Structure formats: C-alpha cells, structure tokens
Image: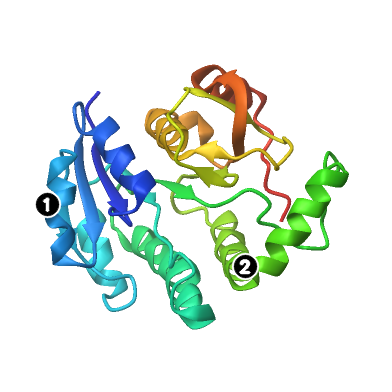
Amino acid sequence: MSKKITIVGGHGNVSLKLAKLLSPTHTVTSIIRNADQEQDIKDVGATPLILSLEDNSVSDFAKSFNGQDVVYFSAGAGGKGGEERTKAVDYEGGIKVFDALEAIEGPKPRLIHVSAVDIRDPNKVPAHYDEADRAMSERVRKGIPAYMKWKYESDKNLAKRTAFKWTMLRPGGLNNDEGTDKADIGRTHICTTVSRQNVAKALALLVDREDAAGLSIDFVGGETPISEGLETFIKKGETDWLG
C-alpha cells in the first residue's frame, strides 16, 4: 500500500538512495535546509521541503509531519561545526522531531530513526563483544566523542517515548561499495563496514514493518539477505538497545 513518507535530512547519501527506492511506490517528501539541493531531491523522485532542524520550530515540523504515515530521521551534523553543532543537530534536532510527532493531534506517523551501532551507555558493554569489538568501540569513542555522546542522549530520549511508534536502525561504519542486499543483523560484531546502499535497502524494507516498533536493530556488513535477516530479528523481538 502506498504511503506518505517524510525524510528528515533528505540530502544525505543514505537519504537520497532511500528516496530513490521509495519514490516509485510511495509519496516521498525530503526535508532539506538548503534550496540549492532541491534538484537533487527531485532527481530521486521526491518533493523537497525546506526546513532547518536548527532554525525552525517544533510546530513547523509538526505541521510538515501531519498526515504522513512514516517519518525517517536521517539527519546529522556529519562532524562539521564542532560539538556545538553536533549537539544542535544530532541531539536537539532529534528531540525537536520527537516533540513534533507527539504534538500531532490524531494519528501520528511512525518514526524510523537512523542511529549507529554501539550507541550506548559506555559502562554497559554488550556481552557478545569480543576483543576486536571492544578495541573498535574504544577507537570510535576517542575519535568522535561528541557524536557518540549526543547521539546516545538522543536515542535514550527516544527509547522512553510512547506517544508514537518508533524503530531504530543502527548501522556500523559506512562505505560506498555497491549494494549486495546482504548484511549481518542484530547483536553482531561491529568491525565490518556496510554499504550505504544496503542501509537504504533496510530502511526501505522497514517502511512496511509496523511489527518492528520499539526495536533497535544493529546492522553491519555480512552475508545474510537483508529481508531474511530483518524477518528473523523482528520475529525474535529482542532489541539491541541496552540503555
């Protein structure tokens, strides 16, 4: 069934690939903050909408989400602008989107939230991590501490929300390889990168998975067909969010 979909952070590499996958069968609106990006959005079959996570209000976003079936949050500062901007986009921007969804009267869209593998309380190390996972986690936390901190605060806030249905996809390190339609999904090791195309494919499949509500899904490179891996994970119903 065709859905009305909004992508927040519509000009990101994953978001553009996602819009291209969704637009043939769904109505896609991609939120961007720069009018110079409008043609890129149109080229993947979506409709551009200019709003800024930093400058627009909760009510502005609530208005844009009203009547939508699914909202994707795939925005991020991308390490630009230092910790202040990382906090403004990855944390405060996320909170703004969550608040906007809650502010909608009547039916609320589902949220599919793009996070990252290993976003967690640094004192809660997953039991399945091996020595390589622990070393990778430590390197990443030292390399991009502001992102790991503020993305965790955002996800922790989302995990407590009950007014709308949400699902988190938590990709590992990203690469630009061709999509394989294969990955390793759920409570996995974190050292293998995953293609942006495969991430987009998983996000596109989640559009119809209302039964994934409340689940956080780790997603790295691997050999399991994505649709099969998601099906197994969702049926198991065990979230990767440790708090």
Q: Residue 67: horizontal and vertical position, in percent?
A: 21, 47
Q: Is residue 71 visible?
A: no
User: Viewed as shown, does residue 142 lie left or right of 203?
Assistant: right
Disc 1/disc 2 C-alpha distance (Å): 32 Å
- Of residues 205 and 80, the one nearer the viewer is 80
Which residue occupies the extreme bottom position in the image? 84
Q: Give, as a three-letter code, the residue at label 1.
A: Gln
Residue situated in front as seen by the camera: 217 or 4:
217
**What's the residue at 15%, 54% (across, down)?**
48
On the image, numbered disc 2 is attached to which residue?
A: 144
Q: Is residue 101 above or below residue 179?
A: below
Q: Amino acid type of disc 2?
A: Ile
Give the residue displayed 22% in from the left and 28% down from the top: 2
- Residue 217 picture location, percent across and down: 60, 39
Direction from residue 22 to residue 241 in the image, left or right: right
Q: Residues within 10 Å of mark 2 (few under 14, many from 20)?
A: few
Q: Quadrant of the N terminus?
A: top left
- Disc 1 element: helix
Label ID, residue 39: 1
Relative to the observer, which residue lies in front, 59 or 240? 240
Counting residues from the N terminus, which is met first, the one under dot 1 or under dot 2?
Answer: 1
Q: Position of residue 97 (x, y in %)?
A: 38, 62
Residue 94 visible in the displayed image: yes
Q: 87 above or below 49? A: below
Q: Quadrant of residue 21?
A: top left
Q: Quadrant of the C terminus?
A: bottom right
Disc 2 is placed on an element classified as: loop
The percent coordinates of residue 136 (x first, y second) are 75, 52
**Colour approach in the figure:** rainbow
Q: Nearer the viewer, residue 94 or 47?
A: 47
Q: Residue at x 59, y 58 (%)?
A: 160
Q: Label 1 neighbourhood size at 10 Å, few (<14), some (14-19), many (20+)?
A: few
